[in-house]
Image: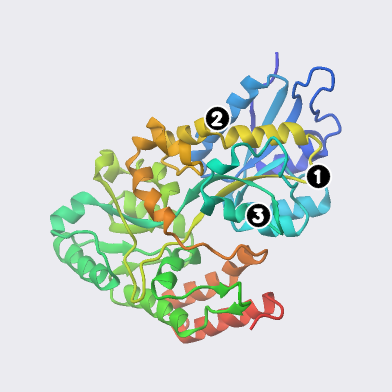
Amino acid sequence: MRRGITATALVAALALAATACGSDDDDSGSTSKSSGELSGTVTWWDTSGAGTEDKVFKKIAEGFEKKHPKVDVKYVNVPFGEAQNKFKNAAQAGSGAPDVIRSEVAWTPEFADLGYLAPLDGTSALKDQDDFLKQAVASTKYNGKTYAVPQVIDSMGVFYNKKMFEKAGVKPPNTISELKSVAEKIKSKTGKTGLYLRGDDSYYFLSFLYGEGGDLVDAAEKTVTIDKPEGVKAFEVVKDLVDSGAAKTDATDGWENMMQSFKNGDVAMMINGPWAVADTLTGDQFTDKENLGVAPVPAGSAAQGAPQGGHNLAVYAGSKNLEASYAFVDYMTSVETQAQTAGELNLLPTRTSAYAKPEAVGSEIVQFFKPVVETAVERPWIPETGSLFAPLNTEYTKVLTGQTTPEKAAKATGDSYRKLLKGWK
């Protein structure tokens, strides 16, 4: 009897890399020359949320095994916050890297620049390329080659508790000033805080930065822009939201604190993306899923901006089962698979045709975020993009917790960027 899909802990996967990982197993298999049938092992590092998304993606991967009975998919759910460095360490060591990794969009150009990804142009991983959203494809390219296939695309919006809003007699805010007035009314009518602002992850700061007309860097001009007046203003905006009492924040374990506060009804709003919907609907406040509202992020003084995010599937250049890995990536990014994740997880497809499928049409979340994604702000697709968040995280948290000023935070972040980006202004 063949083995079903295997879920393992990351530590065990790394410890047993020589026998478990397709990229380091001489018996991992490949396409049989005689029959053309795929065989062997494909190890997949999935970085999706544990407890919700991972269950669905694991189930979908089992479908690949049914289509290819001689292929064994080794499923490993890797915590998102650890995956980037763990993949780089394993790839650099030449031992323990997976055949396929679910890469955050900003990681893809970095991994490609390091030589850790297999080019996918002309392989079975890329089918019906014209069907992919152009903005989703942008992060998969590096130096004229394609190194990944877009799996999901996303952006951010304001999640709000409809019953709390009704009780307070307010509507979703369109601007930052409206956000503050809405929060005041919510506090006076319900005794609850208006907004939970995640304070340990500066990705949640980007909407405010773009709203003030700022950005992290200007890749075309090779110029650091975070410490320009627009960046300082964005830091001032988030600091004022906390200082005024419109928002509460944290310095550690921000995701869990934010999600529990919103799910339990301790706050009326949070800024989040489609990836948070499945978890949100497990909360006491949302046993009736109709109580969950989603609105655009409030506009700043210059614009209404939200970041473009998402995940790609990439193949490790050192994989010893490339053909099966290419086929697995194609399967996991197919129209049918994307429609399934839209229906079960409210995640946004990267294929245009998937939006016409009943599962996507029937998802209010997908329908809401589709136009948001179309106007979302792209990050610079340079190898260093993923590294820009570490220094920003530090300063963002310090601003929100009163440990530094917006001016000092912007300057410190800019100085760190210029050390990272050699030769940039």
Give the residue number, with chain letter if any, for mark 1.
318
Which SS class for mark 1? loop
Vertical arrangement, residue 243 with respect to residue 150, above or below: below
Residue 60 is marked as 2
Can I make out residue 401 in this image?
Answer: no
Which numbered mark, 3 or 1, is in the foreground of this view? 3
Residue 386: x percent and y percent? 61, 63
Determine the residue positioned at 51% across, 33% down: 335
Give the residue number, with chain letter if any, for mark 3.
141
Could you tell me how far apart the alpha carbons at marks 2 and 1 are, in whole angstroms? 25 Å
- Circle 3: residue type: Lys
- Circle 1: residue type: Gly
Determine the residue positioned at 75% across, 21% down: 37
At label 1, counting other C-alpha atoms closer than 10 Å, the crowd grade (few under 14, some 14-19, many 20 or more) is many
Judge left or right: residue 187 versus residue 264.
Answer: left
Which numbered mark, 2 or 3, is in the foreground of this view? 3
Scheme of image coloration: rainbow
Of callouts 2 and 1, the N-terminal one: 2
- Circle 2: residue type: Ile
Vertical arrangement, residue 156 with respect to residue 368, above or below: below
Of callouts 3 and 1, the N-terminal one: 3
Q: Quadrant of residue 295?
A: bottom left
